[in-house]
Amino acid sequence: MPKINYTDKSGNIMSVEVESWLSVMEGALQNNVPGIDADCGGSMACATCHVYVEEKWLDKIPKAEDAEIDMIDMAHEPKKNSRLSCQIIITDELEGLSVTTPEKQS
Ligand code: FES
């Protein structure tokens, strides 16, 4: 199972193994990672799963679709590396993926 690194606003890192084909959001919920609430359950309607993806991983995950980009625009402090973690599906190639939760979600 790929290891995913979740960092909070204070720099604390939680490294957890997550089954492939789950989303980064689901991996967070299953492992009690703070800062990812996922109020809508993954239907791109809340942005409470907003994360910043470490730059080096941006090219390794599929690009955001328009609906995700629209929702990110409504998230708190969006940046160019913002993604909705419910839309990032974990594969073996994402071993070591690092994401950071925004300050307001911690
Ligand atoms: S869980 Fe609501 S947008 Fe991702």
Image: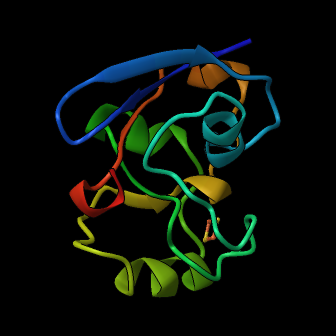
Q: Left or right: 86 with respect to 13?
A: right
Residue depicted at 67% across the width and 34% down the height: 27
Q: Quadrant of residue 75?
A: bottom left
Which of these two is toward me, 70 or 93? 70
Q: Is residue 51 above or below residue 8?
A: below
In this rendering, the count of numbered labels is 0
Q: Position of residue 86 (x, y in %)?
A: 65, 56
Which of these two is toward me, 63 or 88? 88
Which of these two is toward me, 3 or 106? 106
Q: Position of residue 79 (x, y in %)?
A: 23, 65
Q: Taking the image as drawn, is residue 3 in sight?
A: no
Q: Taking the image as drawn, is residue 16 in sight?
A: yes
Q: Quadrant of residue 45?
A: bottom right
Q: Is residue 52 above or below residue 14?
A: below
Name the image colouring.
rainbow
Quadrant of the rendered image holding ligand 1: bottom right
Q: Position of residue 105 (x, y in %)?
A: 35, 58
Residue depicted at 27% across the width and 63% down the height: 104
